[in-house]
Amino acid sequence: MNDAYKVEVKQAPVESDGRCLRIGVIGLGIGRLHIEGWQQHPQVDVVAIADPDLERLAKVGEQFGIPARYDSAEAMLAAETLDVVSVCTPNKFHKALTLAAFEAGCHVLCEKPMAMNADEGRAMLAAAKHAGKRLMINFSYRFSAQSRALKAQVDAGLFGDFYFGRTVWHRRRGMPGFGGWFGTKALAGGGPLIDLGVHRLDLALWLMGYPKPTWVMGNTYDPIAQELAERSGKTFDVEDLAAALIRFDNGATLVIEASWAANIQEAELMETRLLGTKAGLLQKNLNEGYTFDAHIFMEKDGAQFDMHLNPPATPARSAMHDYAEAILAQCPHPAPGEEGLIVMEILDAIYASARSGDPVKV
């Protein structure tokens, strides 16, 4: 990644300046979770929302008591004075709306994936630097209490150096509705790799310390979804499963797998396994759902130890809370756009490798 795209963030006080951040949210599907996340912070006020679906706009506005409602992002940005904007739209619009928010003087929290491709991501980072604003990507799976607890053990040196990993999100049958934007390449950029895999990829990279990728070998498949889509007469032009091997400049490798449709036992399987020189870790979903368990494996004094990691009882802060805190305290924020760009570069390389049948340098 080119250092020219790094955004300088002023290092400073841990205490906030006492002011209240004014937030606008664009896109009220996943955007509802952004509103809830922002509302966790006492110095944040979600003052405006935008969505072209007028029924949804009214429903969400009433639910959260937000009177300023707009049927377009452009109208909201023109009428409101905002500190931060959440971009929660289909992937195709991430770049344009992020650039518009920067032009309006706002910091941006963009939903994953960062953009349709790495070139768009680079343009977003360049715009952030030009505007002197921040760009954070909502890699939400690193913000759970358990993921934070794992990261604390990583940072304490418990695992040594990670040299191999496998990170997975498979669904037996979990495809978005055929004909919708998730299954349309022009709107989404890809299928389960860019939708689900991006979460497990970021989590693994974050725990590994975001090593620099050097090459990727990957492939994509669509036998199950394609047949079902043809039967329903609806558009579906992305993969239903993707898999890849990623090599890093420190010699480590990582396998990533993601699917919306696969003939497996579990309805939903999420797993990240990392092997280190001192210990290994496994985070896996429980009962095929969205709660997780974590274990640590090591050898000590000639004996094998398996440890169960219990996260703190206190609920984890949301990504939005942490972003607000960083802005108010004028300190670096988590999940910066630079890490989002590394993810996009890897995803681009996986799709390129799938097309060519050859390894692709990153």
Image (spheres, grey):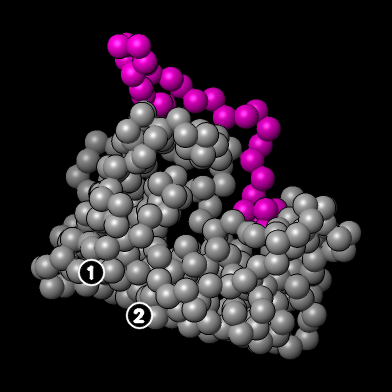
Residue type highlighted by circle 1: Lys
Q: Secondary structure at mark 2?
A: helix
Question: Is residue 326 at all visible to an observer of this figure?
Answer: yes
Range of residues picked out in magenta: 295-324
Image coordinates of residue 103 in percent, x first then y, are 66, 87
Q: Secondary structure at mark 1?
A: strand
Residue 361, numbered label: 1
Give the quarter of the image for residue 55. bottom right
Image coordinates of residue 237 in percent, x first then y, are 25, 73
- In the image, 316 versus 234, the foreground residue is 316
Residue type highlighted by circle 2: Ala
Q: Quadrant of the N terminus?
A: bottom left
Q: Outermost residue, left direction?
A: 357
Image coordinates of residue 362 in percent, x first then y, are 28, 69
Residue 49 sits inside the magenta stretch: no
Q: Which residue is mark 2?
A: 186
Q: Residues within 10 Å of mark 1 (few under 14, many from 20)?
A: some
Q: Residues within 10 Å of mark 2 (few under 14, many from 20)?
A: some
Residue 108 vs 309, above or below: the answer is: below
Please give the name of the residue rendered at 41% of the width and 26% of the height, measured from the top-left corner.
296
Residue 178 vs 243, above or below: the answer is: below
- State the count of labels: 2
Please give the name of the residue rendered at 70% of the width and 53% of the height, measured from the top-left corner.
321
Residue 317 sits inside the magenta stretch: yes
Q: Outermost residue, right direction?
A: 18
The span from disc 1 to disc 2 (Cα, nearest Å) is 25 Å
Image coordinates of residue 345 in percent, x first then y, are 35, 69
Please give the name of the residue rendered at 35% of the width and 80% of the height, measured from the top-left corner.
186
Mark nearer the viewer, 1 or 2? 1
- In the image, 213 versus 273, the foreground residue is 213
The answer to which of marks 1 and 2 sits earlier in the sequence is 2
